[in-house]
Amino acid sequence: MKSISKICLIICSVIICACTQNDVLKVTSPNNHIEVIVDVKNESVHYAINYKDSLFIKPSKLGFELKGDRSLDKNFKVIGFQKSHSNTVWSQVWGENKDIVDNFNQLTVSLQERDGLERKMNLIFKVYDDGVGFRYEIPEQKKIDSIKISKELTEFNFSKNDTAWYTPANFDSYEMLYKKAPLSEVPSANTPITIETTDGFFASIHEANLTDYAGMTLLKSKKKDNFSFQCNLVPWPDGVKVKRKTPMLSPWRTIQITDRAKKLVESNLILNLNEPNKIEDTTWIEPMKYIGIWWGMHLGTHTWTLGERHGANTIDTKKYIDFAHNHHIQGVLVEGWNTGWEDWGKKDAFDFVTPYEDFNLKEITQYAASKNINFIGHVETGGDAQSFQEKLDTIFSMFHGLGVKTVKTGYAGGIQTKGQYHHGQFMVNHYREVVKTAAKYHIMIDAHEPIKPTGIRRTYPNMMTREGVRGMEWNAWSSGNPPEHHTILPFTRGLAGPIDYTPGTFDILFKNAKNRVKWNDLDDGTSRVNTTLAKQLALFVVLYCPLQMASDVIENYENQPAFKFIEDLGVDWETSKVLNGKIGDYITVVRKDKYSDDWFLGSITDENKRNVQVTLSFLDKNKKYRAEIYADGSNADWKTNPQEINIFQEEVSFKTTLELKLAAGGGQAIRFVSI
């Protein structure tokens, strides 16, 4: 791989031996803080995890129930094991950090049934300083050909009734507010689920490299302690969870473990457990900022369908392109440009390529190119994924021919293929096919209503970002996202990968949104954005996304000094650091631009105002900087005075300590420019 730079590779302690059925195998992290114990007890396989001096996960079962076949979960003997160590560095095409350290100890356990079929299964554990990944391997063998998994038996038996941040398990959506509760009161959960332990450390359960498999949710176990969970895979219509052939590798089950919450956000465990980049030429893959004809439809001032309020028309789109060109914005998204919206919910409602009569696609793409602006295509399926997949080459070849390099996809509503869910194996494979086909046509993807991120962006770096979160649009037609929502996301959903949250709404109270039309039953007429203006800027830094949308209509950006922060904002980073943070309360993030000496800081709080001190020790020791500060005004408040902002400058260095005064529901954004 051209993107990998090896600094060290050590293979050590390679041991293959025969073991008795009661043998216990152990593997630790390179710093010895995390220990994994694998125990073949009474011919069943269990694992446990210790962190420092604490038992975190008690012995937990591993294995499968197979439809029409004997379960693959007992009668095992260990026929061999292998230990190894690897320490390398690889470089991202784009990301929060340019270089990623991949340092782990590995244990591979080879199992075989003791009688009868004598089928084989391997368990692979990788233990990092920031967590554990383990997966199943069912090698090719005469005894197993087709595999139908009716249940994955993986357990997570937590040792104590710790505190969790989670959303309830849902096979179709991740667009929910996070709940905080003791593990004993969590009935089910999507992943990532994040845990603060009574022993003072933090953990998150998720998965990596979700390939040709069903998405994993967690379901409360029936064990007496009431804080144990089982893997619950999203099913096919016939109830089978996964249909595969041997050889088979499962996704990695991941347990991130760190001594501080901020280190969870800095963890690269999920990325490291994915395969290296498979796209040889990546010069066409470029992070960017964009605006779009989008927010007006959510407000109800414009429509996706053709009519007098149709947003996607040639005249208005050119205005957006002109604005982007004049304000250092690289792209313009247009939703509702194509026919079919009036037939929403019907099979084959969209052909995905025919523009409405008031939208000249060829003229618009040529005009955008003449202004050096990326036109971002939009493909909404309305859940008709099968029709979309059948037309992938037609759609992407059309966009490629028009010079379009980015496409936003959508799957709003239920999947039309009967009995299928967004997060089952059928759709997991669909989402992957979209990304792979897009790569063939040099197209980047922003997926909405997606499967959750599991680090596939490393393998296919044209998979730029995805929604999979209760994002900005919920503020337009519901009670909105509460101020604490943004201080939870980096420690939960953000651990999985980039978030297309789409911040940047400046008309917080919708005073400029004339002629709003209610189109959603969740809209009670009191909708608004529950932040200050300064927090909207800070979210661009805090919530990582390589395709960063400034979501408001352009009229609200005209003659607005705060928009300069968005103009100046970087989108691809040399390095990122979390300076402080407490889940649900506050967080401060800094990122260094990959192509300049500029640093950007974002700090946000929940509904409580607070002062946060940050030392600028991340800055270059040999330089002075101009801090361009966008702070909450002295009387700012998310409820009563959300748009008061104080913009000023001061000279700073790596020795400087700043006191960030964050209003209730507020934030602060800073650009550091070397002078």
Image: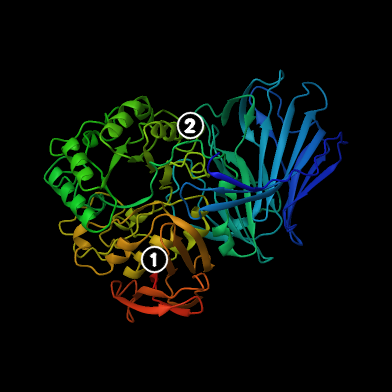
Q: Residue 429 bears which disc, if any?
A: 2
- Choose between 244 and 67: the one closer to the eye: 244
The local secondary structure at tag 2 comes to: helix
Residue at (78, 29) in percent of width and height: 112
Can residue 214 be seen here? The reply is yes
Residue 279 position in % (x across, y down): 47, 36
Residue 551 position in % (x across, y down): 29, 55
Q: Residue furthest bottom?
A: 634
User: Which residue is identified by label 1?
Assistant: 538
- Choose between 315 and 468: the one closer to the eye: 315
Labels 2, 1: front one: 1
Can residue 485 be seen here? The reply is no
Residue at (35, 29) in percent of width and height: 388
The local secondary structure at tag 1 comes to: helix
Residue 306 position in % (x across, y down): 16, 40
Q: Residues within 10 Å of mark 1 (few under 14, many from 20)?
A: many
